[in-house]
Amino acid sequence: MATLGGLERSVMSLLWDSAESLSANDVRDRLGEDLAVTTVLTVLSRLERKDMVRRERSTRPHRYSAVASREEHTVEMLNEVLGTAGDREAVLARFIGGIPDSEAAALRRLLQK
């Protein structure tokens, strides 16, 4: 699983929150930072190489969207971390032991389904 830098996380957050694909200019404008569009294009290219972003090449300017949802990405990260754990059950036990009661109740409901 590819790790993300701060700007990459900000771009992914925008793409995950957007109902439509975005151009590099859209991303730059929504970030609210003083960035050059070339910087945004570089970040989008890196995210595309990490298989997190897809580029629509049929339009000009190109438009970008997330390959997977935020939730799907989070599940991939969790599965990767669990895959490297020597004792998965111990990791799960510590994780579950640290969640608030409201989330524990939701987890119980999900496990009963």
Image (cartoon, rainbow, N blue to C red):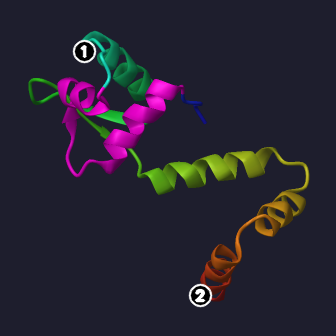
Disc 2 packing (10 Å; few <14; some 14–19; many ≥20): few
Disc 1 packing (10 Å; few <14; some 14–19; many ≥20): some
What range is drawn magenta here? 5-32
Mark 2 and mark 1: span between their CA atoms?
A: 47 Å
Give left or right: position of 82 versus 4: right
**Residue depth check, mark 2 versus mark 1: number of the one nearer the observer:** 1
Residue at image location 76% in from the left, 52% down from the top:
82
Residue, far left: 60
Q: Is 89 placed above or below 65 here?
A: below
Q: Quadrant of residue 26?
A: top left
Residue at image location 38% in from the left, 32% down from the top:
11
For label 2, the residue is: 113
Is residue 93 among what the camera can see?
yes
> Whole-percent x and y of residue 12?
40, 37
Q: Disc 2 residue type?
A: Lys
> Which quadrant is home to the N terminus?
top right
Magenta segment main secondary structure: helix
Q: Disc 1 residue type?
A: Val
- Residue sitting nearer the eye, 74 or 30: 30
Q: Secondary structure at mark 2?
A: loop
Q: Is 14 placed above or below 40 here?
A: below
Residue at image location 64% in from the left, 78% down from the top:
102
> Which quadrant is home to the C terminus?
bottom right
For label 1, the residue is: 37
Residue 79 lies in the magenta stretch: no
> Whole-percent x and y of residue 73?
51, 48
- Ranked by sequence position, the earlier of labels 2 and 1 is 1
Residue 30 lies in the magenta stretch: yes
Q: Secondary structure at mark 1?
A: helix
Q: Is 107 placed above or below 20 here?
A: below
